Image (tube, rainbow, N blue to C red):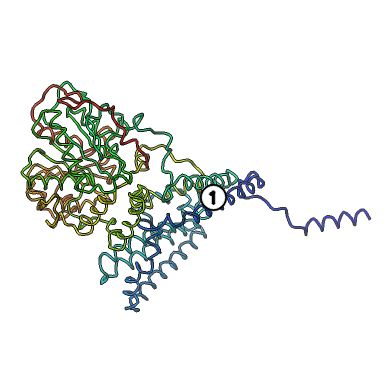
Amino acid sequence: MSDKRQKGDKREAASAPAPSRPLPGLQSPEQFATNLLRAFEASGQAVAKIYEDRDKRSGAFTVAGGMADIGKIFAPIAQYWMSDPQKLAAAQAKLNQDLIDLWGRTYQRFLGEEVQPLIEPAASDPRFKDKEWSENAFFDFLKQAYLLTGKWAGDLVENAETVDRHARKRAEFYLNQIVTALSPSNFPFTNPEVIRTTVSTGGQNLAEGMQHLVEDLNQSGELLRIRQTDMSAFEVGKNLAVTPGKVVYQNDIMQLIQYTPSTESVYRVPLMIVPPWINKYYILDLTPPKSFIKWVVDQGFTVFVVSWVNPDANLASKSFEDYMREGVLDATDAVLRITGEPRTNAVGYCVGGTLLASTLAYMAGTGDDRIASATFLAAQTDFTNAGDLLVFIDDEQLKALDEVMAERGFLDGARMSAVFNMLRPRDLIWPYIVNNYLLGKQPFPFDLLYWNADSTRMPPANHSFYLREFYRDNKLARGLLSLGGVPLDLSRVTIPIYELATREDHIAPAQSVLVGSKLFGGPVRFVLAGSGHIAGVVNPVSRAKYQHWILEDGDPKTIPTVDAFVARAREYPGSWWPDYAKWLGSLSGDKVPPREPGGNGYAPIEDAPGSYVRAVS
C-alpha cells in the first residue's frame, strides 16, 4: 500500500503544472506586482490631469492642435497618390518587398548566420545606441522594420511632386512627429533598456516614472513641460549669468547691463548685444567656461547687453516698433552717453538680429549712423527658406494664436518652447520621455537645458507683427516693410557686417541666413559654424569642438548655396570666436583705459544680471 501511494504521489507530481517562475533576473515578483500597481495608480492620475486640462493643452502652436487637422494636412498627399494607382501600388510593393527581405534576413540570423542589415539608423540617431538593437535579432527586426516604414512614408510625402510646397512641408513636419512618436524605443515592451531596467528594479522604474509624469503635469502651465534637466541645480546670478557688471539703464521693456572690464585697457568703440526676446539673454552668459559675454569682455571690449523684460498683460500693446525704439535705440543712446563715444558696434542674435537689421534699415533711412558695424548670429532677414517654423505660419493658425494671446494678454512661453522642441522631437522630446517616465530617472543637470526651460512670455502686438510681417509675408526682404513711417531698405545698410550661420540650424537655417546676408549694401564676412542654433554659437574656444568655414577670397554674396560655400571655403577646427574677436578688434579703434559700469549721469541701478531676467513665466 505504501509503495502504491508513493508511485501515485510521483505520478501526481509529474502531471501537476510546474510552479510559475519569475522573469529571468526578477528578484521579487511581489515587489514587481506592487510597483506595477503604483505605476497604474499614478498613470490614472496622469490621465485624469490630461483630461482635465485637455483644452489648454491644445490649440495654436501645439502638436495636438495640428493633429486635429490631420486629415486636412495629409489630404493633398493622399489625393496625389490616389490619382495614380499604379504608382501607389509600386510604392506599396517596394515596402512589402523590403519587409519580406527583412524577415528573410532575420530568419537567417535566428539560424545563426551573419547577414548585413537592410537599413541602419543615422550615426547621429541616439535612439538605437543600446547594443541589443543590433545584437538581438528580435530588436534588430523591430528597428529595421520601423526605419523602413518611416522612410517609405517620408518618400510618399517627398515624392508628391505636384503638391504645393507649403502643404508638403507641413505634411513632412507632422509626419515626422508621428513617425518619431511611434519609434519602438518609446514603448516599455519594445525598448531593451527599459525591459532590463524593469526586471532589475522590479518595476520601480515604471512606478517612479509615472510619478514623474504626474509631477510634471501638475507643475506645467498651458502645456506639458517635460523636465529636460535638474532644475534645482542652477540659479540665475549664482552659477548662471555671473559675469560681473551693473544694470545701468532700464525702461518698461528692457534693462541694459554694462560689464565690468577685466583687462588693463579696452577698445575705444563699445559693443552692444541685442539678444532674442523669445528667450532670456543669458544663453550668451551661461556658466563662466561657456560664457560668450565673459570671453568678449576678456578680449578687451566694453560690453553692454540688453536684458528684455518678461512681459505680462500690462505690456500687451508693446509693438515691434516699441522694441526698436525702447530697445535698440534707447540702448544705443545709453551706451554712447555712458562711454562718451560717437558710435558703437552691435550684435544681434536670432530674432534680436532681425530686430537689429530692421533698426539699421530705419537708421539708414533717417540718416542715423551711430552703429559702426553689425554682427548677426543665426539671424534671418529673408524668410523664404525659414524652415519648419513656416509650418505654423498660415492665416488659420495665426488667427487661433491671436485668440490665445487676446485671452490672457500675452503668449505663454511654454507654447514657443513647445514649438522649438517639436522642430527636433527625436532629440528634445522623446529621449526625456523615455528617461524620465519609462526608465524612472531624474534628468541630468545641464545649463543649456535649464536656460531652454526658463522661457519668456511675449506681448501680442509684437509677436503677431513679427510672425505676419516677417515669417508670413517676408516684407523686410521684399522692401515692403516700414517702421515709424520710414520704408526699410537693407541695401542702404552699408556698414561692415559679420554674418554667422550654423550648419545644422533648425530655427534659422543656414541657407536662409546666407540668402539674407546678400540684402545688405556693405561688405559681409559670412562665416559658417558647425552644429546648430545654440551649440554652433555658444562654442567656447576651450572646448575645441565643432568647426567653422571662412571664405578666404571672393565675395560670399556671389555664392548661391551653403553647399557651394563649403566647397569654396576653408574649414578651421574649433570655435569661430577668435576669428570674430580679430574682425571686431579691427573695427573698434585704439585702446583706452578700462571703463567701470555707469557714469555720465547713468548711476548703476543694481548688480548684473538684474531683476528682469529673474522673472519666471
Q: Position of residue 542 (x, y in %)?
A: 27, 32
Could you tell whether 455 is left or right of 305 in the image?
A: right
Q: Nearer the viewer, residue 177 or 412?
A: 412
Q: Position of residue 31 (x, y in %)?
A: 64, 45
Residue on which the image places disc 1: 195
State how many labels appear: 1
User: Is residue 518 left or right of 610 when viewed as pictured?
Assistant: left
Residue closest to the eye, 400 or 441: 400
In the rendering, at what x and y percent does residue 476 appear? 15, 54
* Residue drawn at (58%, 47%) of the image: 203
Could you tell me the amino acid type at mark 1?
Ile
Q: Quadrant of the C terminus?
A: top left
Which element carries disc 1, helix, strand or loop? Answer: helix
37 left or right of 130? Answer: right
Extreme residue toward the right, this view? 1
Between 311 and 388, the one lying in front of the other is: 311
Q: Quadrant of the N terminus?
A: bottom right
Is 253 situated left or right of 341 in this image?
right
Residue 125 location (% of width, % of height): 37, 51
